[in-house]
Image: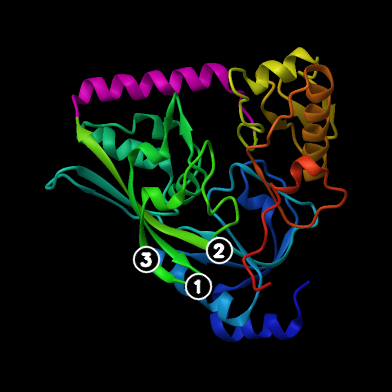
Amino acid sequence: MIAEKMLQELRNRFGGIIQENVLLSNFTTMNVGGPADALIVAHSANQLADTIQTMWKLRIPFVVLGSGSNLLVSDKGIRGVAIINHAHNIKIDTHHDPITVWAESGALMVNIGKKLILRGLSGMEWAATIPGTVGGAVYGNAGAFGKETCRNLVSADVLHKIHGRDIWDCDRFEYSYRSSNIKRNSEKAIVLSATFSVEQGDMDEVKEKMSSYKKRRAKIQPPGPSVGSVFRNPINDKAGRLIEAVGLKGRKIGGGIISPKHANFIINLGGAKAQDIFDLIIIAQDQVLKEFGVSLVPEIELIGEWEHVPDFLESNIHRYLEDE
């Protein structure tokens, strides 16, 4: 637990908006995760920036959570502050070329998709199938159906620990498949908002394309609490196919199961612990490596305190944004 002196400083600074000893299972799509020492909800990009700058100034460790997808929080929780990003304003500008949509980093990608469809705007239909936030999409170069965030991103408002707040163009993120320099931990920075380019389309065609994407995802992906795709797809192959090929579909540990519908998903059947999910990830990676010689790379991040982390997961441990 962070020192009582730090907690008292937080109480003095944030008053009644700070919560203590809050279970993070309430803020993740997998519905698992232990307590955070403290929790603060940010309702705007400016409030998010102010809260983060206060943490850096006080040298208090913290993590920022958006929709809680694509991550696994330890049963032990985190020692520090969880900042829940509920900054979700969205604005569409059709008066300039290119047409753009601006959104705060806590806005859900699916909500961007819904707003675009009402305007008959095309180019981000795939966003309507992404369960995460704008911040998560920019951070991890989220994508679907052959499209990626970097294709639409014009710029982002980024708060950097050393360089302060600035507008980053797409190139500055040094994007790769499902990754950016921020995700690779070479930058201590937080996405506050982002601007994407879209184009005028035919409303019926936009609706049809978005509906098609949703149907395809629903047909493939299993229902139930999950972190989304666990592993990145290897070059010229599918992680789900490899996990299925080693006979792990339906493998259970505690309340977690490797989905019988799609083997690259682990589902919380009810009452699962983060450790159950963690152990299934290790088994899947180990079995695929032994049988096919393919080292699956996890797409998710691990947050909090973990024991006996294997080498292949070390780079997926989310480090607290604190002073060294």
Residue 297 coordinates in the image, percent (x, y): 68, 34
On screen, residue 260 above or below 41: above
**Left or right: where 265 falls relative to 118:** right
Q: Residues within 10 Å of mark 1 (few under 14, many from 20)?
A: few
Mark number, residue 166 = 3
Residue 273 in view here = no
Residue 210 coordinates in the image, percent (x, y): 35, 25
Q: Give the magenta range.
A: 201-224
Query: Is the N terminus in the top left, top right, bottom left or bottom right quadrant?
Result: bottom right
Question: Given the current orientation, which residue lies at the most extreme right position?
Answer: 308
Q: Residue at x 39, y 30 (%)?
A: 126
Q: Residues within 10 Å of mark 2 (few under 14, many from 20)?
A: some
Query: Is the C terminus in the top left, top right, bottom left or bottom right quadrant?
Result: bottom right
Instruction: Give the mark, 3 or 2, whose residue is nearer the N terminus.
Output: 3
Residue that numbered label 1 is attached to: 162
Q: Residue at x 73, y 57 (%)?
A: 304
Q: Residue at x 40, y 64 (%)?
A: 45
**Can residue 202 be found in the magenta stretch?**
yes
Name the amino acid type tagged 1: Ile
On screen, residue 59 above or below 48: below
The image quadrant that residue 258 belongs to is top right
**Can residue 195 be found in the magenta stretch?**
no
> Circles 2 and 1: CB distance less than 8 Å?
yes
Numbered disc total: 3
Label 2's element?
loop
Residue 107 in view here = yes
Residue 10 coordinates in the image, percent (x, y): 62, 80
Mark number, residue 188 = 2
